[in-house]
Image: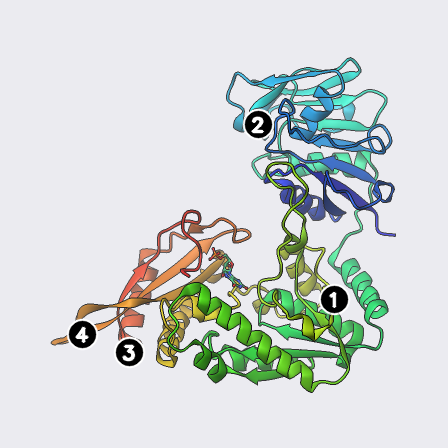
Amino acid sequence: MQQKVLILDFGSQFTQLIARRVRELNIYCEIHPYNSLKVDVDDYKAVILSGSPHSVRGEDAPKPDLSKIKGKKPLLGVCYGAQYLAHFFGGKVGASKTREYGRANLSFVDHASHLFDGIEKDSQVWMSHSDTILSLPENYTKIASTHDVENAAYRIEGEETYAIQFHPEVYHSTDGLTLLKNFLVNIADVAQDWTPDSFVETTVAALKAKVGNDKVVLGLSGGVDSTVAAVLLDKAIGKNLHCIFVNNGLLRKNEFESVLKQYEGMGLNVKGVDASDRFLTALAGEADPEKKRKIIGGCFIDVFDDESHKLTDVKWLAQGTIYPDVIESVSANGGPSATIKSHHNVGGLPDFMKLKIVEPLRMIFKDEVRRVGKSMGIDPELLGRHPFPGPGMGIRILGDITAEKVRILQEVDAVFINGLKAWGLYDKVWQAGAMLLPVNSVGVMGDERTYEKVVALRAVESTDGMTADWVDLPYKFLQETSNKIINNVKGVNRVVYDISSKPPATIEWE
Ligand code: XMP
């Protein structure tokens, strides 16, 4: 049985980061909301309590039931978790007087506890809290301090319980990963057996058992998630997996043909369906962003539905849903867990399809999807592709969409993306693309006045698309790209570069 670690979530923005760090240690872990725990804690080898936007002194402070955990299993409290274990067990937490946000350095470390093995006294840690632990209960021992925070870490005598005020999961805590390893491996004795190869092995076996000899249909998008999901299913059930790759007419230049060829080369049982005309006809004249999205989503379902009805006896629909899409979030007011996001691209699948859902990637993060893909030998170029939205160019052409606008934007995008690759910048950027603006501007070409389209280039750095910074691309590169676009793409006479971060802007313009 796979050993696993439970992360009890109190709603911190960093909870997912804890899970990712634990997974980096090749240890399997799951995040569950503290207030609707639907799993048996006995199945977990160790427990981590996350941070929280709440104060233990607030009326609505999360108060988890730890009766089956504390003193019975190795337990690590982080930030709120540390304050909770102090405040409600005889200690005192109050508002802190000094600034306790950002970088700090340890000023005292007790190495006897082993939590700080290999971590030196001056090690940098990341603080993010406004309350502080003023006094510890009697049987608690302080094991680290910083200049401003006396009780930066402690352990409970006679238990395998440890707690830290700072955030080991944040990169700015230089030795954070070492600390998590000390707790999980050295103290809690959790096996580091969660590797891409072991994931492939157990997932393929589980898929075989779940799906048996049934047929499965899967929509390939050309992106990393659906591709890795398809290859896993292909390993499990071979030709019983029927992949459908739809050309919605809004893909990148030549993408449909080249990606389809790539899929065929990988031995996948894939059918390419060119539905460009259907999408463009349905979109004709529509300028409203939300309506456009709905039309594209609806059309996709219609096409996918038509195609899967051509297959007989299909029982399952496979989706490339990943872990961040299914983690139940603890809502800000600490109430019962709220939203579970449905998958972007096939979210609104109609009931009448009546297919059972199989999601091979639902417990892994994006970086793990890539690692799994690599371990199965998928082309690194495919695994390294930038994210591309399901509605494609449809939300990058502002206003109404025509075949001619798609052509223009595909050409512009190709110049930009190929340029990034040629300059060795593609892998340094999280996502890049071009937007076609619904305005014309005056220009001059030779002796002639022009009145043509404006395009905006956008390149961002991000880890998950939730927040993003625009990328400081070299001026020389921008200059070369702008010249190439204006000289080669008929219909464009002006190029601008988007220097907005998310928030307040978004990555896509619509
Ligand atoms: P925004 O524009 O919300 O985008 O900052 C964040 C990330 O999500 C992608 N995106 C989508 N992906 N279907 C998708 O599959 C969609 O409808 C969709 N809308 C935005 C966007 O490209 C970026 O990576």
Q: Position of residue 490 (x, y in %)?
A: 28, 78
Camera-side mark, 1 or 3? 1
**Within 10 Å of the Cα at label 3, are there few (<14), some (14-19), or many (20+) other Cα atoms?**
some
Asked whether the beta carbons under mark 4 and mark 2 sit within 8 Å of each other, the answer is no
Camera-side mark, 2 or 3? 2
- The residue labelled by disc 2 is 129
Query: How far separated are the C-alphas under marks 2 and 1?
Result: 40 Å
Query: How far separated are the C-alphas under marks 1 and 4?
Result: 53 Å
**Within 10 Å of the Cα at label 2, are there few (<14), some (14-19), or many (20+) other Cα atoms?**
many
Camera-side mark, 2 or 1? 1
Q: Circle 1 — which element?
A: strand
Q: Circle 3 — which element?
A: loop
- Image vertical order of residue 227 relative to residue 44, above or below: below
Q: Which of marks 2 and 1 is nearer the N terminus?
A: 2
Query: How far separated are the C-alphas under marks 4 and 2?
Result: 57 Å
Q: Which of marks 2 and 3 is nearer the N terminus?
A: 2
- Image vertical order of residue 288 relative to residue 246, above or below: above
Amino acid type, label 2 = His
Q: Where is residue 205 in the image (x, y as percent from the top left)?
A: 84, 66
Find residue 77 and report its image quarter. Answer: top right
Find residue 141 and report its image quarter. Answer: top right
* Residue furthest front as drawn: 352
- Image vertical order of residue 176 relative to residue 442, above or below: above
Is any atom of residue 110 visible in this view? no
Q: Does the residue tagged 1 have its C-beta within 8 Å of any atom of ligand 1? A: no
- The residue labelled by disc 3 is 490
- The residue labelled by disc 1 is 358
- Residue 283 lies left or right of residue 158; in this view the side is left
- The residue labelled by disc 4 is 450
Q: Circle 2 — which element?
A: loop
